[in-house]
Amino acid sequence: MITRSRAGTAAGVLLVVVLALGACAAGPNVDVTPTGAGFWLGLWHGIILPVTFVISLFVDTVTIYEVTNNGNWYNFGFVAGLALFSGPALAGRRARRR
């Protein structure tokens, strides 16, 4: 049998988990424009992400993601560029262990 204090604790934990997961939900990008950054710029941004990330820590005007993009094609290019950069690095590290 669950006691009253355990039921309250469980409800509190459940509430915190639901709120935390709700905060992670993606929202619409209101700055998406048809003439925004497309696939090729997304690909380039994905490739240079590691360098851009380090620079963005010290310079406020540098960001790692173009907000005014054209939507899914930019996102696809960004992820593809990131995979092009990180894929060979991870594969090379795995091959050296053998």
Image (cartoon, rainbow, N blue to C red):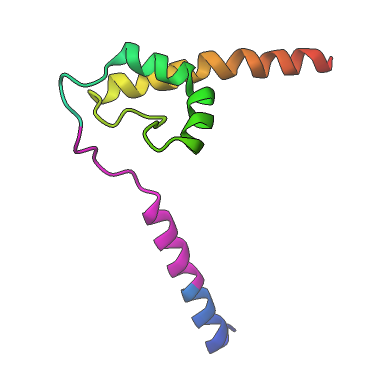
10 within the magenta span: no
Give the residue at x 33% y 43%: 26
Picture quadrant where residue 60 is located: top left
Question: Which quadrant of the rendered structure holds the C terminus?
Answer: top right
Label tally: 0
Residue 71 percent location from the top left of the image: 25, 26
Residue 85 percent location from the top left of the image: 55, 16
Q: Is residue 16 above or below residue 27?
A: below
Give the residue at x 50% y 37%: 57
28 within the magenta span: yes
Which of the pair 51/14 is nearer the observer? 51
Q: Is residue 50 above or below residue 23?
A: above
Question: Which quadrant of the rendered structure holds the N terminus?
Answer: bottom right
Residue 15 percent location from the top left of the image: 43, 69
Which of the pair 60/87 is nearer the observer? 60
Q: Give the residue furthest to the bottom.
A: 4
Q: Give the residue furthest to the front.
A: 59
Picture quadrant where residue 65 is located: top left
Give the residue at x 62% y 12%: 88
Give the residue at x 32% y 28%: 66
Q: Is residue 80 above or below residue 53?
A: above
Residue 67 percent location from the top left of the image: 28, 32
Q: Give the residue furthest to the right.
A: 98
Which residues fall within the magenta stretch?
13-31
Picture quadrant where residue 20 is located: bottom left
